[in-house]
Image (cartoon, rainbow, N blue to C red):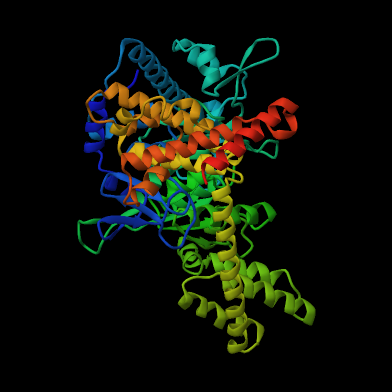
Amino acid sequence: MAFPQSFIEELKMRNSLEAVIGKYVDLKRAGSNLVGCCPFHSERTPSFTVFPEKNFYCFGCGAGGDVITFTMRIENLDYRSAVIQLADAAGIPVPQDDDFAAKKQKEILSRERNFEMNKLAARHFHENLMSPQGREALEYLTSRGLAPSTIRRFGLGFAKDSFDDLYKFLLSKSYTVDEMKEAFLCGISSRGTPFDMFRNRVIFPIIDTSGRVIAFGGRVMDDSKPKYLNSSDTPVFKKRSNLFALNFAKNACVGTVGNSSDRVNSGEMILCEGYMDVIALHQAGFSGAVATLGTAVTPEQARVISRYAKTLFVSYDSDDAGRRADEKAIKYMTEVGVDVKILKVTGGAKDPDEYIKKYGPESFRRLMTGASGQIDYRLSEIIGKYNMDIPEEKLSMIEEACTLVAGVYPEMKREVYILRLSELTGIGKDTIAADIKRRTRRMATAQKKEIAKSGEEALRHYGDRINPDAMKSIKGASAEEQILGILLLYPEYFSRLSSDILCENDFVTEFNKSVFCELKGLYDAAGAGEVDLSALNEIFSPEQMGRIHAMYRKRRALTVNDVQTLIELCAVLKNEKQKMSATPADKMSVDDLQAYLAAKRSSQNGNK
């Protein structure tokens, strides 16, 4: 069921594009537009623009569309889910037909049962922990320094060393085996026998920002493997998009100024590897701590963190896996505009939990104060690779370090690292500055060449994933895009296009043909009314919508978009289609080739 146009219009009116995007992007006024750094790709100079006509476009990566497109892309939602999310935010009831309503109600009921089942499982695990059978697990947690209040606050539990303890409990609460399996609480053996997924483990409930239990992590109490077992993705849980303890940490990013009651975003989080590190930090007063769920940080988690934090302290292990995780964190957090500081524990401790036990919270706070920014961290990694007592290695280190510093912006910040590199190497500041200046110029030249190459490839549609057919006829594809740009601006021009002037079979690319057909369908359905282009979000992906919006934006920048221009472009397209349809000369029969040459000579004579 397509949503009524009146509903979509109200939805967009009640969800200001500026306000929705402003939750993710720091927007600044630029004339009648708003600009900011794009949330969909990494950039230093803002190229993401919000226009007065209630749409956005990134001149860097090509993302574009309206408030629905943005919500689909930033939240990784399909069209209906994005519309429902925006409607819920605005308090607008969503129109539904009977079939869709029944299906949606079934999905909602299934999710609610999943949430309730997880809640019951968490309570059962906690009761196990407090029972005589959970004594060993409780002693393990207390031996790790956790207070009873902390255990209660995080809802920690214990999965008995039983194949069917949780299964039987949930069965008694009227949950089915299929529901338990879908929630990763139960598995099915090769013999078809249900069994508990979590057995003989300390249990850590994972809770979303609404306070609902969405998944579980389980840790063994000895050296058996695997050490941790985490829930797989379920209908209510996506590992790549969630963080342990975010339900508490999100509130820690809001504080007060002095004795004022005004709450402000202090914006600091600590990212750890394990559940115990996070819980130990919270117990010690560092309530902004979170953990990824068995993996290095993901782009989705980076976007979640960016909603709450301006600075992220990353505290992973110092082994190779930890260093790779540090690099990922630097990459993904920088892309979403979060400053990264690398926090390495010292003094023989292997993680924040152990460090706090040995040295206390205040010492850990001092570690945070001295944490390395991403450039300091990378610089120390480079220096650590080389033996400074060997001239050749020292030169290699200096070259690698100068290349790193050459990419630092702004220039004032670069000057700080030039001075530091001079102090570390004993080489004069002016010498290093001159070398970095040369490297900066070379990097700028290379970047310009790359941009020019990318622009040329874009014009020729090399590697075009959205419209791969375009390479077959560059001129034809260009004419199509210009035609569609005009029709996007003025859908009423469809009334001036007879099938002789332009029809869907005249298109040389399938993507542009589909845009034409869908746009014409919207025009025909609207009758004399206004065409709402938001409906295209239901047909095309956010990436495709970016291309469609680029066509609109390019034509809007031109002053000549009249019917005559449209008709002339249609003639160009039809001509290109005929060229593509023509039989190649080497495949023609002798008679056909003679007829073709005679027609061509006649045409040339007629043009003299």
**Residue 571 placement, left or right of 445:** left
Estimate the x, y position of residue 295 in percent, counting from the top left: 59, 43
Q: Is residue 606 visible?
A: yes
When asked about the image quadrant of residue 377, the answer is bottom right
Near-viewer residue (226 or 418): 418
Near-viewer residue (595 or 246): 595
Near-viewer residue (31 or 459): 459
Question: Vertically, is 31 above or below 39?
Answer: below
Quadrant of the image containing the N terminus? top left
Q: Is residue 149 visible?
A: no
Estimate the x, y position of residue 112 in percent, counting from the top left: 38, 21
When asked about the image quadrant of residue 593, the answer is top right
**Residue 164 placement, left or right of 309:** right
Tell me what residue is drawn at x 37 percent, y 32 percent: 82
Tell me what residue is drawn at x 39 percent, y 32 percent: 537
Number of numbered discs: 0
Estimate the x, y position of residue 282 in percent, counting from the top left: 44, 50
Question: Vertically, is 538 above or below 169?
Answer: below
Question: Vertically, is 587 above or below 282?
Answer: above
Question: Vertically, is 35 above or below 401?
Answer: above
Near-viewer residue (538 or 449): 449
Tell me what residue is drawn at x 52 percent, y 36 percent: 575
Estimate the x, y position of residue 213 in percent, counting from the top left: 43, 30
